[in-house]
Every structure is written in C-alpha cells, then in structure tokens.
Image: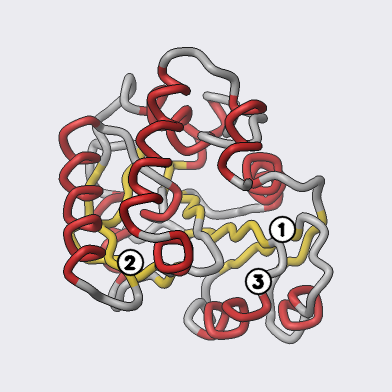
Amino acid sequence: MVKPTSVIVPVLNEEKHLESLLQTLCGTETIIVDGGSTDRSTRLARKFNVTFLSSAKGRARQMNTGSKQASGEVLIFLHADTRLPFGWREMIAEFSNSNNVWGRFDIKFDQQSAALSVIAKMMNWRSRISGICTGDQAIFIRREVFERINGFADIPLMEDIEISRRLRMISKPYCVSYEVVTSGRRWRENGVLRTVLLMWWLRLQYFLGVSPEKLVKRYYS
C-alpha cells in the first residue's frame, strides 16, 4: 500500500529555484515554509497549489513548522535548490514497505566537474558507512517517528547531522541509490577545496562540542 507523502521545503530568498521546483512536485502535498524572504519567493509559491506558511528564520524551525501542517505518513525535507529523481514516488513507496524509519537519496551536483563528482561520491559513501546524512540528500522520515523524537533540534546549523545521530539509534538509514540533483553554487563560488575544508572543520568542531550558534557565524561569513 502506497502511503501519502508530504514534501516540506524551507525557503529563504530562493526565487531562482522555487518555481522550477514546484513544477516537479505537482500532485504531492507540498508545504513551503518561508523564513522571511525579501525577494519574489512568496509571490512565486502562491502561484501553485501548495500550503504556504511563514516562520521564524532557521531551517530547523521552518521544517518543524511545516511538519505540523503535513498530513502525509512520510515526510520529505527538501531544499529549494534540490530536485528529486524521476520515479521518486515509487522509491518512497518501497521505503514505506521496509522496516526502516528514515532514509535519504544519493546526491550529485547540477554542474558536473571531476572535483564535484568525487565530492558527491564521497558524501554518498560516507553517509552509508556512518549513518549520518545531510539535508542536501533529501532526508525522509516516517511521520510518527519524527513526532516521537520531537523533530529537528532548534539549532541554527547542523540540524541534519543532529537528527541523523538520533535516528540511526532507531534504524540505519534507507539509502536510495538514485540521485537527487542539488546546486553546487556554494562550492563553485567559494572553491571546492576551501569548501571541503570548511565543512570538515565545522563538523569536527561540532562533534567536539562547539555550539551550532558559534559555528553558524563561521559558515555564513
């Protein structure tokens, strides 16, 4: 039996990506949660048959807000600059019939290069080994489990890492080998090596106990 699915998209100034994203989600309950956009994101979202909500800024807060309005038994948390693969509904149906309670997709970048291809393969391999997944991989969770663990922690960064650590104590992630396509804009703008080193440093600091409130300032600097 195919269980209904809700897609929750946190948005902050994503007019470049939002319209093309929503065109791919027609027929699926989609909840847009805006964190205070000053561009045309709000206007674009209202052109589609979606639920539009406003929330305090912060991905974790926005996604938690959206989850409270969702009716699906499976919740997909999708970044605005990420596209689900063809046939994703069937893949989620297969997940629904498994014993896993959460999962994610493999990932690739929208503009391929040798460096970004290696980065994507490393991300996919690492999450399979560690059970830690990132928001770019379109994390999906059974609704009743998401509610039981009280959703995302209200932190400004690393919310995906934090919830992965709690979820993997319940079950290993269900890893879909088909790839979501996500934007490589941050990697291209800041440089691949510099971005890799920054991500590793941030995660190391987080695992060593540095608060996300401190790390977020470095991430967005």
Q: What's the amino acid at mark 2?
A: Val
The quadrant holding residue 201 is top left
Q: Which residue is mark 3?
A: 14
Q: Position of residue 27 (x, y in %)?
A: 52, 79
Q: What's the amino acid at mark 1?
A: Val
- Residue drawn at (22%, 73%) of the image: 113
- Compared across the picture, whether 99 is left or right of 148 comes to left
Q: Position of residue 81 (x, y in %)?
A: 51, 69
Q: Residues within 10 Å of mark 2 (few under 14, many from 20)?
A: many
| Residue at the farthest top position | 209
Label 1 close to label 3 by CB (< 8 Å): no
Residue 117's place in the image compared with 46, above or below, is above
Which tag, 1 or 3, sits closer to the chain's start? 3
Question: Quadrant where the N terminus lies?
Answer: bottom left
Q: Which residue is mark 2?
A: 180
Residue 163's place in the image compared with 138, above or below, is above
- Disc 2 to disc 3, how far (Cα)? 18 Å
Which tag, 2 or 3, sits closer to the chain's start? 3
Q: Which residue is mark 1?
A: 33
